[in-house]
Image (spheres, grey):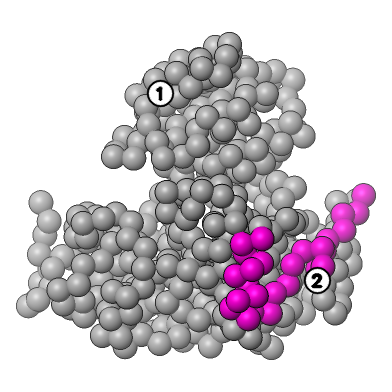
Amino acid sequence: MSTLAEGPGRRFQRLEDWLRWQETLHPQAIDLGLDRLRVVAAGLGLKRPAPAVVTVGGTNGKGSCVALLDAMLSAAGMQVGCYTSPHLLRYNERLRIRGREVSDQDLCAAFQRIDQARGAITLTYFEFGTLAALDLLQGAELDVALLEVGLGGRLDAVNLVDADVSLVVTVALDHLDWLGPDRDSIGREKAGIFRRGRPAVVADPAPPVGLLAAAGEIGTRLLTRGRDFELRRRGDGRWDWLGPSSELCALPPPALAGSWQLDNAAAVLTALHCGPPQLALERAAIEAGLRQVRLSGRLQRLPGPVPVIVDVAHNPQAVAALAGALAADPVAGRTHAVLAMLADKDSRMALTAMAPQVDAWYLATLSGPRGQSGEALAAQLQALGDRRPRRCFTDVASAEDAALAAATGADRVVVFGSFLTAAAALERSAQQPAAALTATGI
């Protein structure tokens, strides 16, 4: 039962009670649009969350780019706040100020201020969280705020703030019911974070026409890969960033697994280069950030006698990238795939992309209104003609247990399909004796 906080007008004192209530407040779980938010933001007196703001959008790679920006700017001695979503293990992960997650107490206080300011206006779970983040960032006396778009861009709650520089990492097919049926439509939505006269970086090597057209209509200063910036890989693992008016050579690789992290890092350097003057960094801070960056759930290897790789990949582009990373790093034995996905994701394409790297499937059910059953995934594999061994389980933990029981030291277990799937694997690992997680990847 929810607990009322002490003091008049206080609704709850525990974070979990606030979050449970927020899930039921608005009639729709997702309700894109900024009109309601602007009214509540005005009531809160929200202004810019920091003197410099970077907004990061795109289908995949947003979290990695925010982590890279945070690591580099923090290494330069700047006071940085980051708002990202979704979280893996704790809601508090969504807001980090000066490298630390905000406390339950601070979040509850922000939620209370929002509740008082909203009047009769209802807000979604994500809208509540975004307003709380902006409220807490504004009061933290920061140099830079890094904001990750939740869904799309144009109508996402994060777009309340006018960014000094915007970054769109990739444009791929996801959230089709909300953003449109093709890359052009989705690109237009993601270009909504751009602002007239301000720089916008697009890391996607083949940006859709819709995004480019929208950028022209907005009047943003667009910088695209291949025309305005590029990266060059060296044989020794180092790489060069070739920017609009300068270059940095022989940089260390990011401490995040996956060849695509170089693409992300090149886009991040371009955003810093073309942003406001206070974002210009010395090489030493850039190198330190590349070496120190950490992010859970992205090709993350968990310790144990059988290697376990956890990845949040949940759409065809991300799953294809995961499959490519596995192909580039083969094991002597077998690959056991633990998969659980939400029903509104393109699981058929994800199964097709991953299948060549899999020797046995362990298909788990995700609970909740958006969840998909392991049996539904098995039916899709059967329809695809996949003859690999497959078993169904009621949850991710039992599927992973079965995969590990069947595996030898020469094998590996790969857990993927959703942030919820990755979180279940990380929680399971945290409960194992002497399980010290690393987030540096393969």
Segment colored magenta: 209-235
Task: Give the side of residue 215 with respect to residue 136, left or right.
Answer: right
Residue at 80 percent across and 71 percent down: it is: 228
Instruction: Mark yes or no: residue 346 visible.
Output: yes
> Is 210 covered by the magenta stretch?
yes
Q: Earlier in the sequence, mark 1 or mark 2?
A: 2
Q: Quadrant of residue 266?
A: bottom right
| Label ID, residue 268 | none
Residue marked by disc 2: 228
Instruction: Mark yes or no: residue 308 visible.
Output: no
The three-letter code of the residue at mark 2 reads Asp
Task: Give the side of residue 127 with respect to residue 351, left or right.
Answer: left
For the residue pair 158 and 154, the one nearer the viewer reads as: 154
Residue marked by disc 1: 376
Residue 1: x and y, percent? 10, 51
The secondary element bearing badge 1 is classed as helix
When the figure is inspected, residue 223 is found, relative to residue 230, above or below; the finding is below
Residue at 59 percent across and 46 percent down: it is: 298
Residue 49: x and y, percent? 45, 82
Residue at 57 percent across and 33 percent down: it is: 349
Q: Residues within 10 Å of mark 2 (few under 14, many from 20)?
A: some
For the residue pair 422 and 432, the one nearer the viewer reads as: 422
Task: Give the side of residue 329 with respect to residue 219, left or right.
Answer: right
The secondary element bearing badge 2 is classed as loop
Residue at 77 percent across and 34 percent down: it is: 328
Residue 417: x and y, percent? 50, 37
Q: Residues within 10 Å of mark 1 (few under 14, many from 20)?
A: some
The three-letter code of the residue at mark 1 reads Ala
When the figure is inspected, residue 284 is found, relative to residue 319, above or below; the finding is below
Residue 426: x and y, percent? 47, 41
Gap between marks 1 and 2 measured at Cα: 45 Å
When the figure is inspected, residue 78 is found, relative to residue 311, above or below; the finding is below
